[in-house]
Image (cartoon, grey):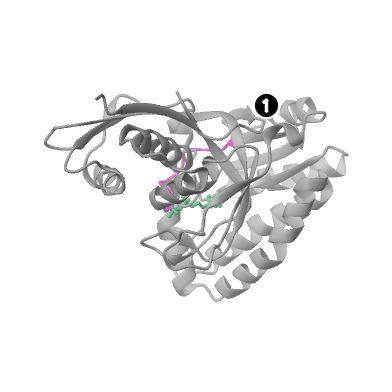
Amino acid sequence: VVMRASALARSNIALVKYWGKRDATLNLPAAGSISMTLDGLETRTTVEFGPWERDSVFINDEALEGKGLAKISKFLDLVRPGTLCADVRSTNSFPTAAGLASSASGFAALALAASQAAGLELTPQELSVLARRGSGSAARSIVGGFAIWHEGQKSDGTDSFAEELVPAEHWDLRCVVLVTRKGPKDVPSTEGMNHTMETSPFYAEWLNTVRRDMDGAKEAVFEKDFVRLAEISEGSCLAMHASAMAARPAVIYWNARTLELIHEVRRLRVQGKACFFTIDAGPHVKVFTTAEDLDGVKAYFQDHPSVEDLLVAKPGQGAELL
Ligand code: DP6
């Protein structure tokens, strides 16, 4: 028997953010979150299990060593048949230099390829739970279109998985990724959220915003209410960053260009374009817009002095076997 499988998964961007864990080992979130899966920002991964002495992992043809390899090996332990080791080959379609998070698409593709190679037939829910163990946001990349990741109640994490709210075809939104500068290395999201949770005086209030925002964001997605989603999503992003900025010492992901682009999005909106911004654990700005206003938004930012690179994504499908 050949114990080998390949899978593809796409990145996702949260509209209601995940920022903090109630269980760091199982990656159980302190609250739920909602995201859009991004077409075109993909990871393709092949996993083969065999009687080798150690796991080997290549990302974009480069061998992974040290902590990165140890993290993947620990993840593979969750599905590994007996004492077999894995050969993992993974490629990202998007520029890694852009500093765009690839852990979501990476662990979603790895969860699907590794479980299939190991001969496990997981349900979509079990697959989302497995991907979550690699990286929280990866739970959402198992699902296509717009995803909701449930906070869950159980301590074993079996009820904390992502589900599709609506398929990709439901709403033709576009996400324009504005890459600012490659600055100093960002604080990894795991570290940033743990530190915020431990030291920020605003952390409890951040969690209250999520509990208030979840239902509204869900409705806005169902009803394709752009204005409402814009309000909730920008609010969720800013509340998350405010909680991180108030941590001691502060976690500040923005650079000068990030703030400049926030103001530009607000100006563009006053000019009548449908747009809103969101920012994750880094300095890049993601601008959501409609298919109708995409050209205008793109033209506005294409040659902007604060934009180093620009990518456009529409809603994408969930993880798939190749
Ligand atoms: C700001 O999923 O990367 O992008 O679970 O520790 O791997 P770990 O964190 P990760 O955090 C994502 C944080 C975020 C918000 C979001 O995607 O919801």
Q: Is residue 53 left or right of residue 203?
A: left
Residues 215 and 124: in front is 124
In the image, the residue with mark 1 has its CB under 8 Å from the nearest atom of ligand 1: no
Viewer-proximal residue, 80 or 204? 80
Q: Overall secondary structure of the magenta stretch?
A: loop
Residue that mark 1 sits on: 302
Task: Name the residue at 42% across, 56% down.
Answer: 190
Query: On screen, 219 above or below 154?
Result: above
Q: Position of residue 266 (x, y in %)?
A: 78, 47
Q: How many numbered marks does the figure carry?
A: 1
Which quadrant holds residue 249? bottom left
Outermost residue, left side: 53
* Residue 26 x/y as whole percent: 39, 60
Q: Nearer the viewer, residue 86 or 159?
A: 159
Q: Amino acid at mark 1?
A: Gln
> What residue is at 54 percent from the left and 46 percent from the top?
140
Position of the C terminus by quadrant: top left
- Which residue is rendered at x = 19% and y = 37% of the image? 85
The N terminus sits in image quarter: top left
Residue 90 visible at all? no
Instruction: Out of 216 and 66, give the one closest to the viewer.
Output: 216
Residue under the image location 42 percent in, 58 percent down:
27
Does 291 sit left or right of 282 as displayed?
right
**Residue 126 in the image, given as x and y percentages of width and height:** 46, 48
Mark 1 surroundings: few (<14), some (14-19) or many (≥20) residues within 10 A: some
Q: Quadrant of residue 179?
A: top right
Q: Taking the image as drawn, is residue 151 in sight?
A: yes
For the magenta stretch, what is the residue range? 178-188
Image coordinates for residue 131, horizontal then vertical, percent: 43, 46
Q: Secondary structure at mark 1?
A: helix
Q: Is residue 35 magenta?
A: no
Q: Is residue 60 left or right of residue 308?
A: left
